[in-house]
Amino acid sequence: MMGSDRNLRPLSEATQPLYAGVDLGGTSIKAALVDDEGRLVAFHTEPTHAARGPEDAAARMGRMVHTLASLAGVATADIARVGLGSPGPLDIPAGKIVRAGNLPGWDDFPLRDRVSAHCGRGVTFANDANAAGYGEFWVGSARGTSSLVLLTLGTGVGGGIIIGDVNVEGAHSHGSECGHIIVDPSPEARICPCGQPGHLEAYASATSLKAMAAEKVAAGGTGSLAAAVAAGEDLSPILISREAGAGDALATAVLMEAARWLGIGIVTLMHTIDPEAVLIGGAMTFGREEHPVGRMFIARVREEVHRRTFPVLARSTTIRYASLGGDAGSIGAAGLARLDHRRLHA
């Protein structure tokens, strides 16, 4: 299906060449066709159907590239290259998902090469959060900057680091795993879903937000959030955000605690990389700057960063929400394909 809410560029106004980006998720696959300036020309999405296995998905991702070409009115051969963003951990040189946590049975499948075989185009393979980071760097909130760190808040905490036109993948395809930096070395540290204690993901993800709220409610917390849970409402970031917006003290405290830990993690990244911009994206951004809760959340993040970092970094580093939303991964994957195409044809 095409995204009716997306501003699609007519082919007659597109700057050639064209690039396709595919963003593989646990529940859906998004595919974008963009021009050489990162402007959307066509968009298509469909369910992942992960249980059908990786070969079925690879075939459908290949067909999605053909669908993008059809939607735009071009031949698939007119797409210069395809980018594929995938959940990790990955073996990027081999084009494989090493351990597919939310895609059971996909481990060590040659995903990049199978998608390439099905679409007939060269494929650039990347971690999905890194791809999203490049999308924001290329045409999103960090456009025009020299470097960025993107933190995606959702079920977990993803990370993308872009310096110049370099996507920081690391020597072992584990670069930019910002959700797994250590923010709490104490013996009582919360356990990350990966099994290790004290990681940022254990404090600033949707999973951790729900866990912290549940603990406070179970410990006798009162107020509208506790009442909503007692009435049977699902304890989710949406509920927590709603009740924080209504002034509930418990919900607000949980959000501010997550923001504090996020700020601590950001300081470590700032002192390591010194990026021009730090962006917060993903599904859990509380309405961003357009909503009071989103403004409250990012203000607390900035407060913690300013309290802990060097003054020059506090003054000079931009901390804001990402702007491409769920399209960042597919647009960024296309952008990484563009980089590879340019290198290969320099």
Image (cartoon, grey):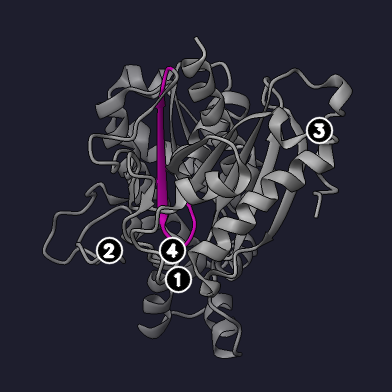
> 149 left or right of 58?
left
Mark 2 crowd level (few <14, some 14–19, many ≥20, 10 Å Cα): few
Query: Which residues make up the magenta segment?
Result: 153-164
Q: Amino acid at mark 3?
A: Val
Q: Which residue is mark 1?
A: 210
Q: Amino acid at mark 1?
A: Lys
Kindly check if marks 2 and 1 are in contact, taking CB atoms under 8 A apart as contact: no
| Nearer mark to the viewer, of 4 and 1 | 1
Q: Amino acid at mark 2?
A: Cys
Q: CA distance from mark 2 to mark 3?
A: 43 Å
> 291 left or right of 88?
right
Please name the residue shown 30% across and 34% down the image. 269
Disc ID at residue 290: none
* Residue at the farthest bottom position: 231
Q: Which residue is mark 2?
A: 194
Q: CA distance from mark 4 to mark 1?
A: 9 Å
| Nearer mark to the viewer, of 4 and 2 | 2
Q: Position of residue 340 (x, y in %)?
A: 48, 24
Quarter of the image containing the N terminus?
bottom right
Q: CA distance from mark 3 to mark 1?
A: 46 Å
Secondary element under disc 2, as helix, strand or loop, is loop
Tell me which label, 3 or 1, sits earlier in the chain.
Answer: 3
